[in-house]
Amino acid sequence: MAGIDYDIEIKQLRATMRTVEQVLDIDAMRREIAELGEQVGAADLWDDQANATRVTGRLSLLQGQVDRFSELSERIDDLEVLVELGVEEGDADSMADAERELGRIKKSVEQLEVRTLLSGEYDAREALVTIRAGAGGVDAADFAETLMRMYTRWAERNKYPVEVFDTSYAEEAGLKSATFAIHAPYAYGTLSVEAGTHRLVRISPFDNQGRRQTSFAAVEVVPVLEQTDEIDIPDEEIRTDVYRSGGPGGQSVNTTDSAVRLTHIPTGVVVSCQNEKSQLQNKASAMVVLKAKLLARKKAEEKAHLDEMRGDVQASWGDQMRNYVLNPYQVVKDLRTSYEVGNPQAVFDGDLDGFLEAGIRWRRGADKADA
């Protein structure tokens, strides 16, 4: 197509891929994959289940990253061939295909480049997300449910499995709180930039006078722990309560006292799980959530101590990090990165990549400034 210099575009894509290859150290990944492959082939691998889980999980993660890099490199090569054939034969359809593929490849390369910025200790982990309604009454509860839908839609777009651990419904509409996991490599590093207070401004559908309402919801994101993580909780530090699951619809899950609430007595951290019919399954799931939250609490305390030693009394993330305005105009704006879009419905439908990429780049810049 006229106006596109494919030689320059492809050279730029390959230059970015070389940078990504160096930062991710693809050669080292391939060497580690070979070493892990030998361990997986050992007959006694599963004699130590914790180590076997670590080895197989690490192998799967590395293989997925290398495959993604290789497939994207091949797509760039194929694009170059497609352009050459289209130019030689004067094939307008081939050039139109090339233009569309160029756009898709550029987006994929940008996403892979952002992945190189996720180098934190737990960034490669899966994510455990908790959403709580804040100030704003029924509008806040409705907003909390909208945010949960937004993140699950984002996961669906990326074909990431979502596992709901707990939902606490508000009386009139929406959710008091919800906790769910997104099972995907780097889900924590990607979604951690969503942590903070979200603010919604709109004409309230629950106000019979049609007044504008401001409501808030809090989003917490912590990493899902692996079996090899050292988080030991003595039995005497946990209080276990069982109760009947609640929710709309009168599902069979509501007929027995299967829901479980765990309270960590020293810290007061409370988690609950009611998504399974079995009390034992719910207790096991609740323990996963509790350990993840205690790890996040430990890391936050360590960071707060370091900030205090540096004299840094300002939090890295403001209480209000994003505005969703539906009236008198329509815009979603991140207050940290200034990234904004004028289509709130698309955002609520899971179109979050622009906000996530901007947040990751912003965080990397903030981390460098603090270093």
Image: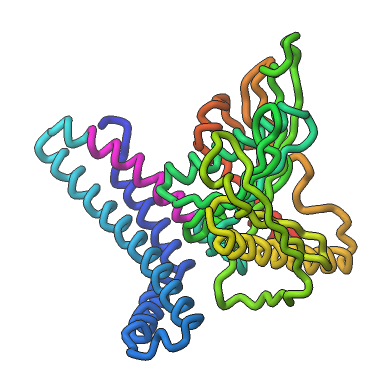
Where residue 209 appears, as percent x and y from the top left, is 75, 9
Identify the image quadrant of residue 147. Answer: top right
What range is drawn magenta here?
96-113
Residue 361 seen in render: no
Please tell me whether residue 100 belongs to the stretch shown in magenta: yes
Identify the image quadrant of residue 213. Answer: top right
Q: Is residue 87 left or right of residue 205?
A: left
Query: In percent of the image, x 79 and y 43: which residue is there?
Result: 319
Q: How is the image coloured?
A: rainbow
In front here: 271 or 248?
A: 248
Residue located farthest toward the front when viewing the structure as drawn: 255
Identify the image quadrant of residue 218. Answer: top right
Where residue 99 appears, as percent x and y from the top left, is 28, 36
Query: In percent of the image, x 35 and y 59: which residue is there?
Result: 68
Residue located farthest toward the top when viewing the structure as drawn: 209
Q: Is residue 175 left or right of residue 61?
A: right
Residue 154 seen in render: yes
Magenta stretch: helix, strand or loop mostly: helix
Give above or below for 220 relative to 203: below
Query: Looking at the figure, which quarter contains the C terminus?
Result: bottom right
Q: Is residue 59 left or right of residue 99?
A: right
Query: In percent of the image, x 67 and y 75: which residue is there?
Result: 231
Please tell me whether residue 1 belongs to the stretch shown in magenta: no
Where residue 352 appears, as percent x and y from the top left, is 53, 40
